[in-house]
Image (cartoon, helix red, strand yellow):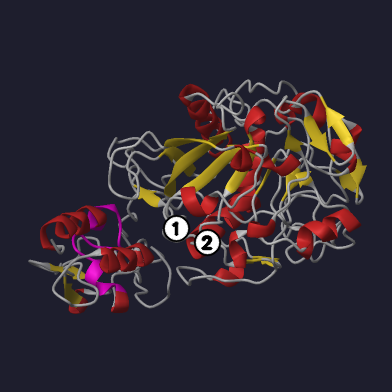
Amino acid sequence: MRTNLACGTLLASALLAASASAQQLDAQTPAQRVPLAVEADNGSIIAGDQTFDSWRAYVQSDYFRQNGLRCGAAPTGVDVALERAGSSADCTFNNTNPSGVYDPSVVKYRIPVVVHVLRNSSGSSGNISAALVQSQIDILNEDFLAILGSNGENGTDVQIEFYLATVDPSGNPTTGITYSNNSTWYNDGGSYWTSLAWDTNRYLNIYTNTAGGYLGYVPDLPQGGLVGSTSDRVVILWDSFGRNAPIGPPYNQGRTVTHEVGHYLGLWHTFDNGCGTTAGCYTSGDRICDTNRESGPNYGCSASSSCSSADPIHNYMDYTDDLCMTEFTPEQAKRMRCSLEHYRPNLYEIVVAATCSDGILNQGETRIDCGGPCPVCACTSDAQCSDGLFCTGTETCDDFGMCSFGPAPCAGATWCSETTDDCRPYGDGDFDSDGDVDLYDFRAFQDCFGAPGLGACAAGKMTGSGVIGAADLAAFTAQLSTRGPN
């Protein structure tokens, strides 16, 4: 199977039967990456022994397709992760466990983005306006949030939102866009990321330049341990960036960025590693069972079939035209959320749903204003206070600490953890008991969000009853601002 250079996540080292050109790619580290196509001073595109008049002519050529240059991603195959709720074993290079803890209904995440626009030295080629940058962020959200009326409305709402950073790493206001004029960087050379990267633990860094001859790439999946290094990045051909991009159809509607961010969040191509097996779909192929198995990439938008099923031509992780791509699947959504939680734990912020007090059953709530993304619904009946279940019987306090009004409710600054005999003092947010509520405590609070306020999470149960939720987040934030170090 050939390496697919259009997306650019150097995944080839983990692929089977790679071509000779793919093997050459696999041997490159992010700092050693050799561009497969460059733009000359006269604007012509030089690729191997061929020359093209423009990037549009290049991506429409047989050379582009025959060399699989829509994406250039290739993971290392070595898993590195931090443990949080669930397990990093749920989304390794070689395995996916689509557990319910990663369901999009649990909580919404927001990710800050910085876009580094790299132009040639004169600034005459590679420029992207702020409006075009914002249009690309809009497309990401249309695709990841399945926004009604957009191309992605029929896909899965992943509940991951992107926004241009408003504060830079030094704490200064920013537009979330930087501009640099350097012809070497513009042709994807010179290790530009070492000079330009914002903290890759805290920002999604996107670079636009000639992308080394690909439409886009990432150097590795997050499972490979690249997170936190300056080389952790998404690189996009500037001419295909944003809505109605200059390159023209079929790659001018921003789906290259959606595809690459899919890799950035741990997804394989739908065709990676060949057909795999139906029985072993979580450990073969793309490690996803609800994407139809596929033997190789599809271009254009024509229905096709391989591996005894229709190919997933509308999936963002195939190679079809931008307007043909319309969806992530539910299990892809869970794998991305798992990768974000375990491999990029400092990248996102938690969004507390604004609909949790509107008196309407909406946004995944299981009852009005509770359940799903909102606080856990109070239990009104269950005699089994040790069955590990919510509300099964006649209990007045469930096994996860959510009390209803029983005959002797806890009083004062205490809450019920199991029965009224288990009234516990509220936490103060100081997880490490050092007298401050600081960044360390915030990370510990994140780990405990949605969990019972017991044991190691006791400091995070600061108000109300039940699992640690939105009300506790508000109380913790107040302590962070008043008790944190100066």
Give the amino acid type for the residue marked by disc 1 in the picture: Asn
Q: Residue at x 20, y 65 (%)?
A: 406
Q: Up-down: is 5 above or below 11? A: above
**Residue 168 vs residue 195: left or right?**
left
Q: Up-down: is 403 above or below 198? A: below
Q: Residue at x 18, y 68 (%)?
A: 415
Q: Is residue 154 visible?
A: no
Q: Residue at x 47, y 55 (%)?
A: 200
Q: Nearer the viewer, residue 227 or 119?
A: 119
Specify the quadrant that holds the C terminus. bottom left
Question: In terms of image quadrants, where is residue 439?
Answer: bottom left
x and y, in percent, of residue 252 in the image: 68, 25
Specify the quadrant that holds the N terminus. bottom right
> Which residue is the site of mark 1?
201
Give the amino acid type for the residue marked by disc 2 in the picture: Val
The span shown in magenta is: 457-472
Q: Nearer the viewer, residue 194 or 285?
A: 194
